[in-house]
Amino acid sequence: MDTPRKVPVSILTGFLGSGKTTLLNRILSEEHGKRIAVIENEYGEVGIDQALVINADEEIFEMSNGCICCTVRGDLIRVLGNLMKRRDKFDYVLVETTGLADPGPVAQTFFMDDEIREEFSIDGIVTLVDAAHIEQQLGRSDESTEQIAFADVLVLNKTDLVNGEALDRLEARLRDMNRMARVVRSERANVSVDTVLNLGAFDLDQVLERRPTFLEPEYPFEWTGVYSLDIGRYELDLADGPDPAMSLVVVSDQGTDDAALRESAEWCVRRYAEPAEIIRPGEKIPVGKHVNLQLNSPGRKSFFLEVDTPVRVGLYAEHSAEEFDLQLTNAEGATIRQEVERTWVAQHEHDDEVGSIAIERDGDVDPKMLDAWIGELLSERGVDIFRMKGFISLAGESHRFVFQGVHMLFDGQPDRPWGDSPRRNQLVFIGRNLDEQSMRQGFEACLI
């Protein structure tokens, strides 16, 4: 007999006035064809037309569109238990928290209670963000910060009240705080039900498909172009761009596969940490050094490279080639096309406290060492770790191990077989004042 499928659960949170009530009204009143059980902290806040209620018990209200609405005046576990008596009436659960709530304890419920864990699984945490007021809220409210840090999806609501430039800045700040989340913009919480349901938010494969650079480390450069050059002199020509200068490192003997690009990228990180040599138009660009190309004069600017022996070089540039219309030409004026082009996740400023760490390493992990490391990490820093998820290649196991966690609670289970896929470990942590270097070293010590 097949094991019954767990009921997926989405947790809906957001600060006061962010639009949760509007979204819940949409879910409970629109004909979307889904059978959803909505658990609402205070039923009166939702304001559902009583004509939509076709059956009502003490806490559970069945809606004419197939939804079920529950009030939470007491224990969430008790309400979930009552819901399971009507298991044939719904396929999905949506839990809404109060505007001043930390979503952590709600999420922890689905880890702590054995019976609940057997029946339900968290599909994702959705946070509504008031685009017009979130900047002020982040400055004075720990709850709004934690709501953003816990999210798998951030619904940036009330976008009609903020101009496009301010929205872009705000979205960039949200991404700094939570690399894990997908950002969706909306007006009046007008998003489809599929935005908050069936997220597959704990499936890193889906996240990586949505954003291939999700687990990329951050670099002090954004773009690499690889060029094959014969002996001779070459001009590097740039137009006006977003900055009056651009940092660059030219790497010699550059390989073209991903492993070679990553190896050179790590080497360039160390070069970028060194003081840059100022290079003005008409001057030679040295190979293997951090340089700063001066671009503050009007019109296009040219710099030159000298090649003594045929070589393949990589340009690791602070900005993309398109931003400065970067062109490389030979002595005859012919344009040299890059063999390979690569974009990196550019380094950016983080909020002082809340941030995210992504760890990606090939190879197998010793299960005992991993268990000891996770145990020590959570006992020492679990309060500061809001969310974590990922998958791990355990030595001797044919299936990858998928895990997720909230604060000091950790849960994991075998997933699909590795098959021919490369055995790779990918982990994401979101929290406050996390020591990235220490965490990376701790995990790497678990590798065999």
Image (cartoon, rainbow, N blue to C red):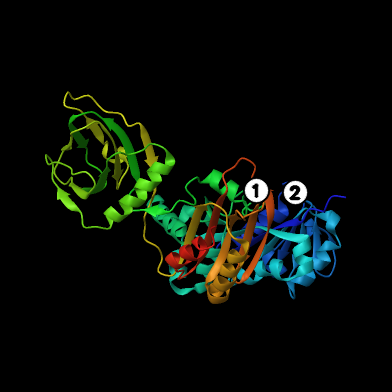
Q: Could you say where residue 223 lies in the image, as x and y percent from the top left?
A: 34, 43
Say which of 111 and 427 sits in front: 427
Say which of 313 and 62 sits in front: 313
Q: Could you say where residue 410 lies in the image, as x and y percent from the top left?
A: 64, 66
Say which of 441 and 132 sits in front: 441
Quarter of the image that includes the C terminus: bottom right
Is residue 49 among what the camera can see? no
Q: Amino acid at mark 1?
A: Asp
Q: Could you say where residue 209 lies in the image, as x and y percent from the top left?
A: 55, 43
Q: Earlier in the sequence, mark 1 or mark 2?
A: 2
Relative to 447, say whether 422 is above or below.
above
Q: Could you say where residue 140 lies in the image, as x and y percent from the top left?
A: 45, 74
Is 426 on the left-hand or right-hand side of 63? left
**Residue sitting at x 53%, y 56%:** 180
Q: Amino acid at mark 2?
A: Lys
Relative to 343, say whether 272 is above or below.
below
Q: Secondary structure at mark 1?
A: helix
**Residue sitting at x 59%, y 47%:** 205
Which image quadrant for residue 299? top left
Q: Secondary structure at mark 2?
A: loop
Which image quadrant for residue 83? bottom right
Residue tagged by mark 1? Answer: 194
Characterize the local packing of mark 1: few (<14), some (14-19) or many (20 or more) Cα atoms within 10 angstroms. Answer: few
Relative to 251, say whether 427 is above or below.
below
Is 34 on the left-hand or right-hand side of 405? right
Which image quadrant for residue 258? top left
Residue tagged by mark 2? Answer: 34
